[in-house]
Image: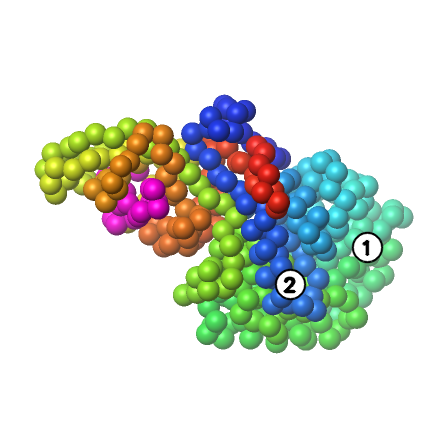
Amino acid sequence: MPTTSTVTGNTEPTAAAVVARIDLGALVHNLAVARRHAPHSRVMGVVKSLAYGHGMLPVARTLVRAGCDALAVARMEEALALRQAGIEAPLVVLEGCIWAAELEPARRHDLQLVLHDVHQLEMLRADRGREPVRCWLKFDTGMHRLGFDPAEAQPLLAQCEALSQVRLEGLMTHLANADDTNDPATPRQLARMAEVAALADLPCSIANSAGILAWPESHADWVRPGLMLYGASPLLGRSAAELGLRPVMTLQAPLIAIHGIHAGDPVGYGGTWRAPEDLPLGVVGIGYGDGYPREIAPGTEVLLRGRRVPVVGRVSMDMICVDLRGVPEPRVGDRVVLWGEGLPAEELAEKADTIPYTLFCGVTERAARIYREQGGGRRAG
Ligand SMILES: Cc1ncc(COP(=O)(O)O)c(C=O)c1O
């Protein structure tokens, strides 16, 4: 598994065709937005899945430097990669251990494991006589994905307390529907978690980005922002700009050809789109092989020279075609924006019948990540 974002093929950033520009200043700004919404909570920045495709190490380093209290990843190997790269911040592994052999590295690297299943407790019980492992107990308050039944909270807490090899750091749950501010499922989850939290004097963590922005009663002791750190809106019907978030990733690709086509000419595989009149067609060097979604609806747009330009025909592996009628002087080599600055990822996600999470995580290794430091300096990842 790649543990850092990479520049593939080209090591010279300006020579890379498809570029994901990562604005680390925007990341720090978005962290401050999370803090403003939850001023009494500590922040566990979520950097799993290569920091949602933005590059785990540069993102982790920036968050830690900006005062993020802890980082969260999904898996052990992600946590170990962070430790190997010298990240010393508190690290929470949201899926915890799968195999007993992982307990020793968890201890050695001071990782905090989320316990969500009896097999993990059994592994720890069998690990008698060892130094304590830091753990969070996760409860399923309604999502039915990971976590113990809240009805078992009391005996579970007693069992953990009786095990010298377990040091409980806190209690956790995850919200399933917080993106919809009218959904009664969230208050139900919060009520269940309140009952669990009342049983122990331990820190509690509930809120993801949507919880932070829309459900103040979910803030508790620790919040766990992911998507909002990367500058996209987690809330239905609310834009990132409205929420004061700045896009961190801007995905760009070059215009690689311009040619005239005639009225009635079909464009791309299957000829699903035909030119309504003679027009200039542009070919942009990005496709589903780079992470641009193939499933876009007609009328999806990209940005060229500050203008919105429609994508026409099917997305292929390495290319898309655009109708250049609205652009006065397009040139081969012009950088086209697929999402990011000036074109919100949520907008494309909607056109592709998906969510910004999958767009970000889907950007492949082929795209060079170019980082803009907080002060404005640039480097390749
Ligand atoms: C357990 C847990 N907490 C927090 C997050 C962050 O969620 P979001 O990106 O919606 O803020 C996730 C993301 O999937 C998660 O699985």
Pointer 1: residues within 10 angstroms few (<14), some, or many (20+)?
A: many
Colour mapping used in the image: rainbow
Residue 304 is covered by the magenta coloring:
yes
Dot 1 falls on a residue whose secondary structure is: strand
87 up-or-down from 233: above or below: above
Residue 362 is covered by the magenta coloring:
no
> Where is residue 329 shown, x and y percent of the image?
26, 37
Give the residue displayed 33% in from the left and 52% down from the top. Answer: 351
- Taking the view exactly as shown, the residue that stands out farthest to the front is 329
Q: Are marks 1 and 2 in contact (CB under 8 Å)?
A: no
Which residue is nearer to you in this view: 269 or 172?
269
Q: Marks 1/2: CA distance?
A: 30 Å
Which quadrant would the C terminus be assigned to in this image? top right
Which quadrant would the N terminus be assigned to in this image? top right
Give the residue displayed 87% in from the left and 48% down from the top. Answer: 131
The segment highlighted magenta reads 298-317
> Where is residue 220 shown, x and y percent of the image?
68, 69
Pointer 2 residue: 35
Which residue is nearer to you in this view: 151 or 280?
280
- Mark 2 within 8 Å of ligand 1, using the beta carbon: no
Q: Return the disc, 1 or 2, that comes first in the chain's sequence.
A: 2
Pointer 1 residue: 166
Dot 2 falls on a residue whose secondary structure is: helix
Pointer 2: residues within 10 angstroms few (<14), some, or many (20+)?
A: some
Q: Amino acid at mark 1?
A: Val
Which corner quadrant of the image does residue 167 belong to?
bottom right
329 up-or-down from 180: above or below: above
Which residue is nearer to you in this view: 93 or 359?
359
Residue 122 visible in the picture: no
Give the residue displayed 35% in from the left and 49% down from the top. Answer: 352
Q: Amino acid at mark 2?
A: Arg
